[in-house]
Image (cartoon, rainbow, N blue to C red):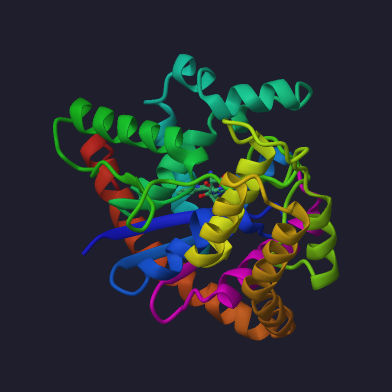
Amino acid sequence: METVVSGIRSTGNLHLGNYYGALKNFIKMQESNRCLFFIADLHSLTTHPTAENLHGNVQQVLAEYLASGLDPEKATIFVQSDIPEVSEMYVLLNMLAYIGELERTASFKEKVRKHPHNVNAGLLTYPVLMAVDILIHKATKVPVGKDQEQHLEMTRVYARRFNNMYNTPFFPEPDAYNFGSELIKIPGLDGSGKMGKSEGNGLYLMDDEATIRKKVKKAVTDTGEKSDEMSEPVKNLFAILNVVSTPEVVNHYKEAYAAGAIRYGDMKNQLADDICKVTLPIRERILDITKDGQYLYKVRKIGAEKARESAAKNLVEMKKIMGFKLL
Ligand code: TYM
């Protein structure tokens, strides 16, 4: 049995990238593994949420986890900051992380480029905190989207470095994982890169039908002229169709494209229908669950207790290996 750990930052509502890149895998994996899924509220601090927003965002992601099908009977669901052991291990692991390698991380370089006025130290050591989330439970599999692959590579480096330095195989080297296939990247509807919160190109689990239809209608396409190489925006539409629609539907539009007979308007209508089929029932459940503050509190509390057990045990062992004499 694998130990599976993963999380999503609490920076607002979850989008289709979060759902297909991570959450859907969490739901599959909880059936037959030891699973710990959390809400990364410490990581969300790099973008400075207001005190009012911090807790609201955590509650929202928790409700979205549950509404999507994460089951607190099967998986341990918790909030990162409820586990103080994480912050302590973060201090210890930081000593094994070199500035040079942190500065070369793709996600760090991108943040520096996009937000030059907020290059805080938390951003630099973001991959160290993420490695702690994983190593503190000795996870072996980490379900994430393609954009997190490099962070997982760094997690393996830190595990190996610790094991070599102290000459003991303490931390397993975890793998980035997507249930039965390659890691994926869900693109946005704006014809460019990945779907993301800060990119402003997201389709959210919380969007209502009218919003989804409007966003899909506005999605960038091309002139529809036949060419050998499919244009980037159209590839993106197909990539989303691929995850929300049946293989028959995808094939139908691929054949129409190949024959030069595709009508993007039809394809968009189909895409909007199929997105709605996936997200609208989840949206209904989110609205219900959000009303039940007591249930959310109970899930969070039970999750924290369970997660702290393994975190505390592994932290103590780590400290002993490092030579601390504990009181
Ligand atoms: P975050 O909050 O940016 O994203 C959460 C998860 O959603 C995936 N994802 C995507 N997958 C495919 N296509 C997209 N367009 C897309 N956008 C987001 C991400 O790959 C991720 O799996 N660092 C993490 C949170 C984290 C974590 C961890 C994850 C903190 N500690 C420990 C795993 C293990 C993050 O920023 O995710």
| Image location (x, y in percent) of residue 160 | 25, 31
Q: Position of residue 226 (x, y in %)?
A: 66, 36
Residue 274 lies, with reference to residue 255, above or below; the image says: below
Residue 53 shown in magenta:
yes
Percent x, y of residue 264: 74, 52
Q: Residue at position x 51%, y 24% from top?
A: 105
Q: Is residue 276 visible?
A: yes
Q: Quadrant of residue 118?
A: top right
* Horizontal relation, residue 127 to residue 44: left or right: left
Q: Which residues are magenta?
A: 48-77
Residue 39 figure quarter: bottom right
Q: Is residue 13 left or right of residue 187?
A: right
Total labels: the figure holds 0
Vertical placement of residue 314 versus 23, above or below: above
Looking at the magenta stretch, what is its main secondary structure?
helix
Tell which of 179 and 67 is nearer to you: 179
**In this orientation, does residue 327 appear?**
no
x then y, percent, for residue 41: 62, 53
Quadrant, the N terminus: bottom left
Q: Is 208 left, or right, of 9 in this rendering? A: right
Identify the residue at image location x=39%, y=31%.
154
Above or below, 93 against 182 in this view is: above
Residue 262 lies in the magenta stretch: no
Q: State the residue at coordinates (43%, 37%).
A: 149
Taking depth in this image into account, of 236 and 198 the one nearest to the observer is 236
Q: Would residue 95 be found to the left or right of residue 171 on screen?
A: right
Give the quarter of the image for residue 224.
Answer: top right
